[in-house]
C-alpha cells in the first residue's frame, strides 16, 4: 500500500513538472531555461487548439492609452522582482512566455488596464513558496487548467499587431461558430527585446465548451 502511494506521488510530481519544462522541448522558447508546456489538441492553417495545465504566475497591472506604455511599466516591475526586489533578495530565472491579458472592445484612443504576467519557474510550481515582492502592486495568481485557441505570428508584439491578430483569430473562430471568451484575449511573447529575427508571438482566446478544430483537422 505504501509502495502504491509512492507511485502515485511520483506520477503527480511528474505531472506537475510537465506544466513548466525544459525549454529544449519547445520550438518557441530559445532564450530561457524553462518554458510553459502544453498539449496540442489540433492545428490548422488559421489557428491551433491547445491544453494547458494549471500554472502559477507573478503579475502586475498597468493602465494607459497605449499598450506599449502599459506593458513597459508592468514589465519592469516584474523584472525588478525577479532581479531581487523581494523579501529574500533572491534572483529568479526568467521564463517564457510573457503573457499580457488585454481587454477587447476598447477603442484605440481609450485607456485600458493591461495585466502582464511572468511564469514562475518549476521550483515555485511544486509547492515551494516564492519570495514576497517588495512592490505591493506586484502579486501572484494561478492560471487555471484551460484550453485555448492560438494564432501564431512573427515580428514584434505591439498595440497594432495585437488588434490585427486578435481580430484575425476572432474572424477564424466566428467562421466555424466556435465559442470563446469575448471579453479579453492574451497577447503572448516568447522573445526578449534584444532578439531581432525569428521572433515568435501568439494571441490566445479562452475556449468555452468543447473546442472546434480548424478545417485542416487534428495533428
Image (spheres, rainbow, N blue to C red):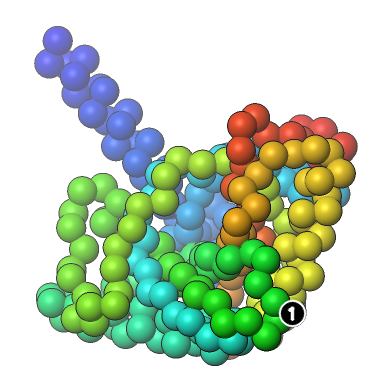
Q: Is residue 140 left or right of residue 64?
A: left
Question: Toward which corner of the image does residue 183 lie, by quadrant?
Answer: bottom right
Which residue of the protein is positioned furthest toward the top in this rendering?
Answer: 1
Along the line of sight, which residue is nearer the eye, 48 or 122? Answer: 48
Question: Toward which corner of the image does residue 104 lie, by quadrant?
Answer: bottom right
Along the line of sight, which residue is nearer the eye, 125 or 157? Answer: 157
- Residue at image position (35%, 37%) is 14
- Residue at image position (29%, 37%) is 13
Q: In which quadrant is the N terminus drawn?
A: top left
Is residue 30 visible from the viewing direction of this image?
no
- Residue at image position (50%, 49%) is 37
- Tell me where residue 207 appears, x and y as whole percent: 62, 41
Q: In which quadrant is the C terminus drawn?
A: top right
Q: Is residue 189 left or right of residue 163?
A: left
195 over 172 or under it: above or below: below
180 over 188 or under it: above or below: above
- Tell me where residue 56 appears, x and y as whole percent: 35, 55
Along the line of sight, which residue is nearer the eye, 157 or 196? Answer: 157
Q: How many marks?
A: 1
- Tell me where residue 190 appears, x and y as whole percent: 57, 69
Circle 1: is it few (<14), some (14-19), or many (20+) Cα within 10 Å?
Answer: some
157 over 101 or under it: above or below: below
**At numbered mark 1, what does the secondary structure look like: helix, strand or loop?**
helix
Is residue 12 visible from the viewing direction of this image?
yes
Q: Which residue in the protein does label 1 denote?
A: 160
- Tell me where residue 75 appears, x and y as whole percent: 44, 81
- Residue at image position (23%, 28%) is 9
Question: Toward which corner of the image does residue 121 lie, by quadrant?
Answer: bottom left
Amino acid at each position: 500500500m505504501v509502495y502504491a502511494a509512492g507511485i502515485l506521488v511520483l506520477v503527480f510530481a511528474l505531472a506537475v513538472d510537465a506544466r513548466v519544462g525544459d525549454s529544449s522541448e519547445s520550438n518557441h522558447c530559445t532564450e530561457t531555461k524553462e518554458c510553459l508546456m502544453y498539449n496540442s489538441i489540433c492545428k490548422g492553417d488559421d489557428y491551433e487548439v491547445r491544453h494547458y495545465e494549471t500554472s502559477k504566475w507573478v503579475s502586475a497591472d498597468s493602465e494607459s492609452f497605449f499598450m506599449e506604455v502599459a506593458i513597459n511599466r508592468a514589465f519592469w516591475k516584474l523584472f525588478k522582482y525577479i532581479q531581487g526586489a523581494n523579501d529574500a533578495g533572491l534572483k529568479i530565472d526568467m521564463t517564457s512566455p510573457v503573457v499580457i491579458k488585454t481587454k477587447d472592445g476598447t477603442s484605440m484612443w481609450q485607456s485600458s488596464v493591461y495585466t502582464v504576467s511572468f511564469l514562475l519557474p518549476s521550483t515555485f510550481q511544486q509547492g515551494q513558496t516564492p519570495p514576497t515582492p517588495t512592490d505591493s502592486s506586484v502579486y501572484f495568481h494561478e492560471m487555471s487548467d484551460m484550453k485555448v485557441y492560438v494564432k501564431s505570428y512573427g515580428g514584434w508584439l505591439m498595440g497594432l499587431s495585437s488588434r490585427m491578430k486578435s481580430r484575425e483569430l476572432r474572424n477564424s473562430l466566428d467562421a466555424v461558430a466556435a465559442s470563446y471568451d469575448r471579453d479579453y484575449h492574451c497577447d503572448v511573447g516568447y522573445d526578449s527585446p534584444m532578439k531581432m529575427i525569428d521572433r515568435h508571438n501568439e494571441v490566445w482566446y479562452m475556449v468555452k465548451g468543447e473546442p472546434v478544430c480548424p478545417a485542416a483537422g487534428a495533428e
